[in-house]
């Protein structure tokens, strides 16, 4: 695999640190991405999204959902309740995991629900008023009669 050095990008740009960091993370990550637990990302409205993660076997207290540094971090660690049990077959994977999702600017987590073995995390993109498109009113020019009258009045004072 090729290694790309992004140091010139850091030196030549100002204010694009997040993009450079994201590219660095993508290029530096291993080829084999973890596939556990499986998840879906769906668009539920124009500015709303939902991440659904299959977390069968985990209770609410075993799950953790945090937002830190433009990333949504979902992790789980199963409590030791299986002690004293003898499994003939153990097909439900309840191993600990941590899954990270990078959030775009102005995306906030609205909430999370755990239902029927699925963890649903609702996200909403909220664009600030300063960044929304706005219509600029076109002003009508002032009437020239008022300007000419002011000029005539100023000359008569002198």
Image: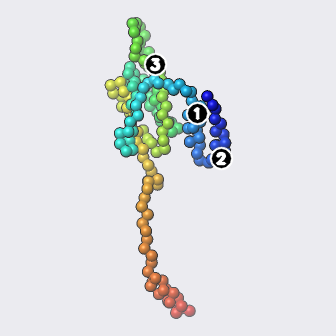
Q: How many marks?
A: 3
Picture quadrant of residue 94:
top left
Q: Earlier in the sequence, mark 2 or mark 1?
A: 2
The residue under label 2 is 12
User: In the displayed structure, would residue 136 be above or below residue 115?
Assistant: below
Is 44 positioned to the left or the right of 9 in the image? left
Give coordinates of residue 38: x percent, y percent. Answer: 42, 26
The residue under label 1 is 27
Mark 1, secondary structure of its residue:
helix
Q: Work out whether residue 110 can be spotted.
A: no
Give coordinates of residue 123: x percent, y percent. Answer: 40, 39
Give coordinates of residue 141: x percent, y percent. Answer: 45, 76
The residue under label 3 is 95
**Relative depth, front residue between 12 and 59:** 12
Measured in 3D between alpha carbons, the distance from the residue under mark 3 to the one under mark 2, in whole angstroms, is: 44 Å
Q: Which mark is residue 101?
A: none
Measured in 3D between alpha carbons, the distance from the residue under mark 3 to the one under mark 1, in whole angstroms, is: 27 Å
**Viewer-nearest of discs 3 and 1:** 1
- Residue positioned 44% across, 49% down in the render: 127
């Amino acid at each position: 695999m090729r290694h790309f050095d992004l140091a010139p990008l850091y030196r030549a740009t100002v204010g694009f640190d997040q993009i450079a960091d994201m590219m660095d993370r993508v290029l530096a990550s291993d080829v084999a991405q973890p596939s556990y637990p499986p998840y879906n990302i769906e668009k539920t409205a124009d500015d709303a999204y939902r991440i659904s993660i299959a977390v069968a076997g985990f209770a609410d207290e075993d799950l953790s959902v945090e937002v830190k540094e433009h990333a949504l971090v979902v992790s789980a660690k199963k409590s030791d309740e299986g002690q004293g049990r003898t499994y003939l077959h153990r097909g439900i994977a309840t191993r600990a995991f941590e899954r990270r999702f990078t959030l775009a600017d102005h995306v906030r987590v609205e909430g999370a629900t755990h239902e029927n073995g699925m963890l649903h995390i609702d996200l909403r993109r909220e664009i600030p008023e300063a960044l929304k498109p706005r219509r600029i009113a076109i002003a009508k020019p002032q009437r020239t009669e008022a300007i000419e009258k002011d000029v005539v009045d100023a000359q008569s004072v002198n």
